[in-house]
């Protein structure tokens, strides 16, 4: 299903008597992230969904009840935006403290979105995060990024600077690198490792029509985020001659991994790499979650790095 939203839904976020106050609240609070999901938008805090706003007027989805088991879920309205989101954020803070690591990778995903889309450094990174949690059948991709290099020529979309799409898998720590199974209450849950995610990606891009529809949807979604001001400094309409609409991208979609807080003494990554096809990995720029093209390394380079 397409993640970009309808023109009618877009207009509601620009109407001061409708959803505009919600949009402005999110833009003023960089701990929040607004993502589009076709017939609704979801607002995230620390990687957890704290509010859903549906295209049907007056239809809202409150914070996920699992973040506050046994407690009364607060209800959202346009009249209590601040009070609701303040309480919802506190609920997620308590949940992440008491249920360790449940939102760990999702929290990191949101930090990557923040650093590359709307932090003080986002103008200088080489990637914008267009989407997160992209659903494909029963599979899910963590992040979808647009590589748009931060050179003046690339930002002006010179003929030699054509952006390209990346699907990014985020892993935290060494225990998430390889596939694992856990059993609880007679129910088996599988946590896929890098190899399975790479296989899912290869299956996804094997269908040319599916890839074309995906690319069109992501370009439209990126355009909508720029119109709404969710990519500060690159808002369409501001400096329009300088930062044009992205209408052309490279035909090939790339797959890359972000390995956060990986313990290099572990052998898990080396073992997983032996089973994987060639792949790209983001290396950090000193400390931080800004993504740079110069920080990309392939499988061979990573294996060499691990042997140092």
Image (cartoon, rainbow, N blue to C red):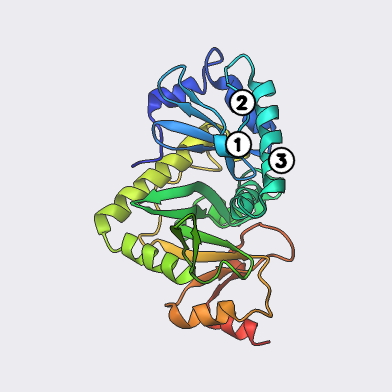
Name the residue located 70 percent from the left edge and 47 percent from the top edge. 98
Label 2 close to label 3 by CB (< 8 Å): no
Q: Residues within 10 Å of mark 3 (few under 14, many from 20)?
A: few
Measure the C-alpha gap from mark 2 to mark 3.
15 Å
Label 1 close to label 3 by CB (< 8 Å): no
Is 187 or 166 nearer to us in this picture?
A: 187
Please count the marks in the image: 3
Is 11 or 94 nearer to us in this picture?
A: 94
> In what quadrant of the picture does the N terminus appear?
top left
Measure the C-alpha gap from mark 1 to mark 2.
9 Å
- Identify the mark nearer the N-term, 2 or 3: 2
Name the residue located 44 percent from the left edge and 40 percent from the top edge. 221
Residue 54 against residue 203 in the figure, above or below: above
Measure the C-alpha gap from mark 1 to mark 3.
12 Å
x then y, percent, for residue 290: 65, 57
Name the residue located 49 percent from the left edge and 51 percent from the top edge. 157
| Residue 235 shows in this picture | no
> Of all residues shown, which one is farthest toward the right?
287
Q: Secondary structure at mark 2?
A: loop
Lateral position of residue 206 relative to residue 285, left or right = left
Label 1 close to label 2 by CB (< 8 Å): no
Q: Residues within 10 Å of mark 1 (few under 14, many from 20)?
A: few
> In what quadrant of the picture does the C terminus appear?
bottom right
Q: Secondary structure at mark 3?
A: helix
Lateral position of residue 191 relative to residue 302, left or right = left
Name the residue located 68 percent from the left edge and 22 percent from the top edge. 82
x then y, percent, for residue 217: 37, 44
Query: Which residue, given by chain and number where applicable, does mark 1 sit on?
Result: 69
Query: Which residue, given by chain and number where applicable, does mark 2 sit on?
Result: 72
Query: Which residue, given by chain and number where applicable, does mark 3 sit on?
Result: 94
Residue 173 against residue 144 in the figure, above or below: below
């Amino acid at each position: 299903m397409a993640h970009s939203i309808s023109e009618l839904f877009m207009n509601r976020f620009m109407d001061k008597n409708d959803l505009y106050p919600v949009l402005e609240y999110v833009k003023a609070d960089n701990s929040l992230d607004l993502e589009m999901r076709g017939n609704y938008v979801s607002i995230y805090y620390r990687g957890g969904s704290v509010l859903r706003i549906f295209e049907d007027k007056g239809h809202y989805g409150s914070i996920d009840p699992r973040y506050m088991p046994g407690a009364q879920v607060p209800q959202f309205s346009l009249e209590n935006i601040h009070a609701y989101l303040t309480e919802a954020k506190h609920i997620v803070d308590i949940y992440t403290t008491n249920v360790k690591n449940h939102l760990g990778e999702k929290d990191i995903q949101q930090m990557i979105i923040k650093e590359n889309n709307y932090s003080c450094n986002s103008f200088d990174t080489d990637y914008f995060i267009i989407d997160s949690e992209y659903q494909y059948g029963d599979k899910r991709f963590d992040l979808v990024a647009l590589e748009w290099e931060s050179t003046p020529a690339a930002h002006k979309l010179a003929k030699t600077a054509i952006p390209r799409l990346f699907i990014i898998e985020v892993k935290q720590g060494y225990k998430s690198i390889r596939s694992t199974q856990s059993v609880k209450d007679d129910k088996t849950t599988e946590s896929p490792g890098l190899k399975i995610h790479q296989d899912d990606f290869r299956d996804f891009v094997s269908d040319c029509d599916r890839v074309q529809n995906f690319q069109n949807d992501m370009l439209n979604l990126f355009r909508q985020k720029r119109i709404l001001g969710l990519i500060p400094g690159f808002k369409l309409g501001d400096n329009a001659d300088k930062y044009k609409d992205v209408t052309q991208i490279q035909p090939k979609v790339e797959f890359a991994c972000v390995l956060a807080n990986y313990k290099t003494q572990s052998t898990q990554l080396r073992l997983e790499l032996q089973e994987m096809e060639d792949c790209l990995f983001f290396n950090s720029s000193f400390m931080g979650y800004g993504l740079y093209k110069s920080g990309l390394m392939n499988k061979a380079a990573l294996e060499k790095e691990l042997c140092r």
